[in-house]
Image (cartoon, rainbow, N blue to C red):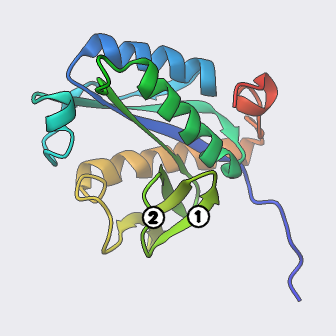
Amino acid sequence: MGTPGVPKPVRFFASVISRDEGQIHRAEEALVNLLGDIEETTAPAPFLHTSYYDKEMGEGLLRCFFLFESLLDREMLGSIKLKTNEMEARLSVEGRRTVNVDPGYVSLEQVVLATTKGFAHRLYLGDGIFGDLTLIFSDGTFRPLPWTYPDYGSSELISLFNAWRDKYKALLRRGTGGAGSSGCKQTGRC
């Protein structure tokens, strides 16, 4: 019989998509209030991987990623997704989203995204939220799976997540940034 244990805390990140850099900045401020300080931000880049958001948000979309400093408990993913959904609603104009915010986390073994859409590979987390196993770490790098979104399977994003995994691994070795160190659990913001 196995003995239940508590998994190591993880590094949360968020993907933010919008046509308006001002809305990206507003989402960034709200994310800091939710998850604590940001360690790294990617520059806004054209989001050309799908036209899925164009009808609601328009063309010419930009995307950037935010990596948060604190290590937090992975089971917080569902509540964080609910909060980012509220954030999207607050930033909507005339019932249409102006920003898409997708939270996820990086662990030593995987990258997991939160979603409201169920599918065969997505595990139910509760409150209408599923965890999407997006990348797995194998043979020294993150690797996509058959269902991985094409952008997350790109060499550019895999390199980014590999670098973030290295930073996460260094934090674990130093024993710093423990669960809830300045994010949701300590602040009560989730």
Q: Position of residue 147 (x, y in %)?
A: 32, 70
User: Which residue is denoted by mark 1 in the rendering?
Assistant: 124
Residue 36 makes an appearance in the image: no
> Would you identify the image quadrant in which residue 98 lies?
top left
Residue farthest along the front direction in this orientation: 94
Number of residues whose C-alpha sits closer than 10 Å to that of mark 2, classed few (under 14), some (14–19) or many (20 or more): some
Residue at the outermost bottom position: 1
Q: Which quadrant is home to the N terminus?
A: bottom right
Q: Amino acid at mark 1?
A: Tyr
Taking 143 as reference, is 89 above or below it? above
Mark 1 touching mark 2, by CB under 8 A?
A: yes
Side (left or right) of 155 relative to 40: left
N-term-proximal mark, 1 vs 2: 2
Residue ID at (45%, 73%): 121
Q: Residues within 10 Å of mark 1 (few under 14, many from 20)?
A: some
- Side of 150 relative to 85 (left or right): left
Q: Residue 76, position in %: x, y?
A: 68, 45
Disc on res. 118: 2
Q: Nearer the viewer, residue 75 or 168?
A: 75
Q: Position of residue 149 (x, y in %)?
A: 28, 59
State the residue in front, 95 or 70.
Answer: 95
Q: Position of residue 140 (x, y in %)?
A: 44, 67
Quarter of the image where the C terminus is located:
top right
SS of the residue under disc 2: loop
Quarter residue 2 falls in: bottom right
Residue at 21%, 39% (x, y): give it. 53
Q: Is residue 76 above or below residue 146?
A: above
Name the residue type under label 2.
Gly
Cα separation, mark 1 vs mark 2, equals 7 Å
